[in-house]
Amino acid sequence: MTGGSDPGADDAHPTLAQEAGTAVSAAVLRLAYLTGAQIVQAPPWPGASLTEEQPEPGAGIRIALALERAARAGVRVYIRRASEAGMSWAQVGGALGVAELAQERGSSVAEAAWEYAAGRPAHLSGRPGEFRWVCPDCGEVVSDRGPGGRSPAEDEHGHAEGCHRLAAAVAQWLAQGD
Ligand SMILES: [Zn+2]
């Protein structure tokens, strides 16, 4: 992601969003062939002078939806890797671009990031949600309850006894409290 402010981006340097759109169109068509969907010749947009191969609209919806779900699952895979690499929820929120969403909800960027990862807003459920990742230090599965301003010892269930990473996180949290 370079340049930044140019919304159009010229053809020589398509934006990430444009490249993603192209990739999705190609994937939809590939999966349409793969699943035996009906293929039609149609203009890419109303009034276009050329036509292209597309699945019939119903199949297109089902296939694009499957890709959307797979992409969301893919985001969670990278959030898990980010957590395992030691990125904070605030840093994950920065990568997710949830600052605006957080402001609407009156929560922090860190909380909005965790809610995205856990798949549900914490305030809508009596039971706390969780997001699981594997601690690279102790090797245990951690049930992350999110950034609640509590000690990591309370937020991150599952670390093994004597885990160095958890000890370091607790020490850092205690230092911030002073
Ligand atoms: Zn651990």
Image (cartoon, helix red, strand yellow):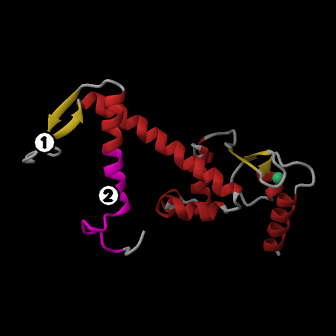
Q: Residue at x 52, y 56 (%)?
A: 105
Name the element at disc 2.
helix
Name the element at disc 1.
loop
Outermost residue toward the right in this view: 162
Distance CA(mark 2)–CA(mark 1)? 20 Å
N-term mark: 2 or 1: 2
Give the label, 2 or 1, closer to the camera.
1
- Per the image, the residue denoted by label 2 is 18
**In the figure, residue 6 lies in which quadrant?**
bottom left
Whether residue 108 is visible: no
- Per the image, the residue denoted by label 1 is 51
Q: Residue at x 46, y 39 (%)?
A: 69
Q: Where does residue 53 sit, x and y in percent of width and height? A: 20, 37
Judge left or right: residue 100 versus residue 19.
Answer: right
Quarter that holds the N terminus: bottom left
Q: Where does residue 50 sit, x and y in percent of width and height? A: 10, 46
Span of residues in magenta? 5-25
The vertical placement of 78 against 8, above or below, is: above
Type of amino acid under label 2: Gln
Residue nearer the viewer, 108 or 66: 66
Q: Where does residue 92 sit, x and y in percent of width and height? A: 59, 60
Q: Where does residue 54 sit, x and y in percent of width and height? A: 23, 36
Judge left or right: residue 169 versus residue 88.
Answer: right
Judge left or right: residue 56 versus residue 28.
Answer: left
Whether residue 83 is visible: yes
Residue nearer the viewer, 68 or 42: 42
Quarter that holds the C terminus: bottom right
Q: Callout 2 environment at 10 Å: few (<14), some (14 to 19), or many (20+)?
A: some
Residue nearer the viewer, 157 or 76: 76
Mark 2 in CB contact with mark 1 (< 8 angstroms): no
Residue nearer the viewer, 100 or 75: 75
